[in-house]
Amino acid sequence: MESMLNKLKSTVTKVTADVTSAVMGNPVTREFDVGRHIASGGNGLAWKIFHGTKKSTKQEVAVFVFDKKLIDKYQKFEKDQIIDSLKRGVQQLTRLRHPRLLTVQHPLEESRDCLAFCTEPVFASLANVLGNWENLPPSISPDIKDYKLYDVETKYGLLQVSEGLSFLHSSVKMVHGNVTPENIILNKSGAWKIMGFDFCISSSNPSEQEPNFPCKEWDPNLPSLCLPNPEYLAPEYILSVSCETASDMYSLGAVIYAVFNKGKPIFEVNKQDIYKSFSRQLDQLSRLGSSSLTSIPEEVREHVKLLLNVTPTVRPDADQMTKIPFFDDVGAVTLQYFDTLFQRDNLQKSQFFKGLPKVLPKLPKRVTVQRVLPCLTSEFVNPDMVPFVLPNVLLIAEECTKEEYVKLILPELGPVFKQQEPVQASNMILLIFLQKMDLLLTKTPPDEIKNSVLPMVYRALEAPSIQIQELCLNIIPTFANLIDYPSMKNALIPRIKNACLQTSSLAVRVNSLVCLGKILEYLDKWFVLDDILPFLQQIPSKEPAVLMGILGIYKCTFTHKKLGITKEQLAGKVLPHLIPLSIENNLNLNQFSSFIAVIKEMLSRLESEHRTKLEQLHMMQEQQRSLEIGNQMNASEETSVTHTGSQQIDKVFNNMGTDLLTGGESENKEDGLQNKQRRTKDLTDTLMDNITSLTSLSASTPKLSASSTFTSVPSAGLNMMFSTPIDNTKRNLTNGLNANLGFQTSGFSMPVNPNQNFFSGSSTAGVTTMTLGAAPTLSSYSPLSVPPAAVKQAQQRPADMSALNNLFGPQKPKVSMNQLSQQKPNQWLNQFVPPQGSPGMGSATMGVQANVMGQAAFGMQGNPFFNPQNFAQPPATMTSSSSASNDLKDLFG
């Protein structure tokens, strides 16, 4: 690893030293920074080409440097001739201005060590591209080594050279004299440019006369840099010491041959015996056949054969060459049109740009990036042309890598993102960008998305054009996954909601709802519940399409695994909103069915979830109640009773409390026990014993213990009067005393828990007394005055306990407040108070009407809840009408 780093360090140091030594002291370095060595060009590839940058403007240039060390081996006279030849070529190039000639940015500068001048950015010379790497750095760039000329590049490149020669021959009246691959430069955009005017010959006659080009005799004693390349030189130069414009056309034919033969010239020349070589070449040219040109495309093969003809007059001129069918290629013509674009008006440009998307796919990527893209982006300065140029730029961007896009395209799009004038062009730009939004969001860095792309989307949502709003709403779901969540939550969603609420267009409103429905999955649950669902209730219109959009959002939220609606919101917000919407008159049958299906599904889930919750709560309450009852029974067992009367009264009230808590089960057990007692005891004796015990109890007036086990009498039963006769075979004690025995029961008190829930069965001991029955005037009685008929009647007519069972028994299901609210007032009361005249609850015994007692007992008398009008339910009517928009089907079904 260390050796590799050292090697790299030495290479970089060597290259830096070469560059520094090459241009050190040259005035060019005052204005330009010289970078890496990228290519070579000119006669004999003597010029090293460096990448450069202008210090003041940071403009990219190419710096051509001729290092004088290359000619140290020559004598001073020869050195001067070489320098003069090089200077002449650069100075002539600087004076000429044409798109097909290399553009000079800074004139030639000479220092003690080198010559240097600057031109437009350059990629390489044609010779480098064809494999001649002379005077290149040791580490040749892969861009040059792996460079492959495409057919369209070759065709258009040769066409450019032909156009350049046509300019020289017709307009300048000049013969280039050294048209070779070394003097054809490929600039950064891939255009072929002519340089190397070291041996150019201008016409000696005035412009109105036939041009005459004086030619110098070949001098083999001159250094090679002072002579043109003989391999591309026309035979008349050597054999007849004459030249004309046709001589350049021969050179062009030789270049075409070399291009299609990997840089190999058609003839190799022995420079030591130049005349003999050319004589042999002349003979071969006279017998040149198509078999020698098999590598050249058939469309241009005959033209090349004519260009290489020995007779100059047979050769086609440059202007004729530009018109041959070989150059009528679509790609070549397109590239040619770009080079003349500055000459066209806006109408011609717009027509050309409209048809360009059909041509771009036929061009190689490198050609579109290097040649087409710079021409397109240069038109961004013309606001009227941007809508025509932008689709082509984005089409090229699709083929670029992310790095190429960021480097070459994104900087040019920056001003276009913000363009708002003229309004018509701005609207078209928005439409184009929206259609390619996925491309922009995929390849644009996140920071630039926030700064440039998303603001444009927001502008589109707020645009006055309904078409732009619709398009924006339609495409937002396609790239919603690429938008960061804060931007979506804080900027995008509010604008979509505003577009829905503020628009007067039904299409925009429906598309807003569809858009929201499609991007719900990218939002979190609570944002949807707290922000999106409440927004639905603000939508003012009731068109079927809008209603179906609202239903779709509810359904998506309800059924989505990530989202979901809580049962509280279902009951409190969603269903109260959906149910009225379902009976809108505009809905047709299918739409109404969709509403009802969603509502039923919601109700089903609501019932299931709440029932499950109540069942779990009921189980917990039952478990707690069991624990409390068990604790009370343990406490009762530990309580000691000091006398028999207290034990009997405790037994009576324990039995009654058990009836209240357990209902029929305790009664069945007690009945079994009493039946057994009835078989072993005389009924009359038992009754007399009970009366005797109560008499003694009355004399001693014992107090009930606070730990009395009868703790289940509810507070709601305060002031209730019980005087129903009860068979002593079932209860051992009637309510007080049997009225038929000829005496009245005295009022007595018992501890009651004021917080006791009558229907919950809680059994905490209370301290409040509950009076059972009024205390009428008591007549004196004697235990011996009980008539036998009373005993017989008690044995033959057992008391009807249905009233108590109805009041306290567990066989009645619990009634919820919602169910109570649906019943009429009398029905609600009758659940708790038996009707008048029922057995065991007669008015004669109770001394009060049942309905009056019920209202007094439950504290509801005079409550407006008992108004029968509050329970009237209006009939629900559901109608259906027009259909919803078909746009909702794909999303919501």
Image (cartoon, helix red, strand yellow):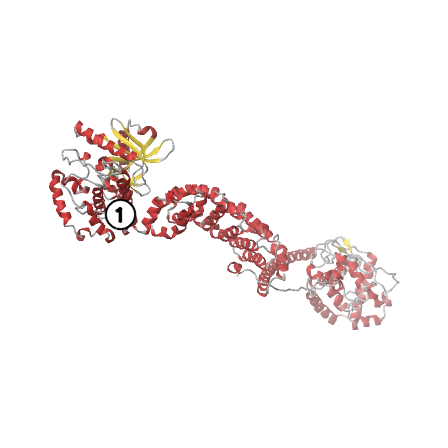
Q: Which residue is mark 1?
A: 320
Where is residue 128, by image quadrant? top left
Please state which of residues 817 and 572 is positioned toward the viewer in this rendering.
Answer: 572
Where is residue 802, by image quadrant? bottom right
Q: Secondary structure at mark 1?
A: helix
Q: Position of residue 815 (x, y in %)?
A: 69, 61
Position of residue 175 in the picture relative to residue 451 (left or right) = left
* Residue appearing at x 17%, y 52% in the figure: 289
Please state which of residues 318 and 21 is positioned toward the viewer in this rendering.
Answer: 318
Please state which of residues 648 and 295 is positioned toward the viewer in this rendering.
Answer: 295
Q: Position of residue 589 (x, y in %)?
A: 59, 65
User: Visible in this render: residue 364?
Assistant: no
Position of residue 636 in the picture relative to residue 789 (left or right) = left
Q: Looking at this rendering, what residue extends furthest in the front direction?
A: 208
Q: Position of residue 738 (x, y in %)?
A: 82, 66
Crowding near the residue tagged with mark 1, few <14, some 14–19, many ≥20 C-alpha atoms within 10 Å: few
Q: Please, is residue 809 above or below residue 573 in the view? A: below
Q: Label 1 is placed on what type of residue?
A: Gln
Please state which of residues 297 and 18 is positioned toward the viewer in this rendering.
Answer: 297
User: Visible in this render: residue 766?
Assistant: yes
Name the image quarter holding the N terminus: top left
Q: Please, is residue 239 above or below residue 717 in the view? A: above
Position of residue 432 in the picture relative to residue 222 (left or right) = right
Q: Position of residue 396 (x, y in %)?
A: 38, 48
Q: Count the marks.
A: 1
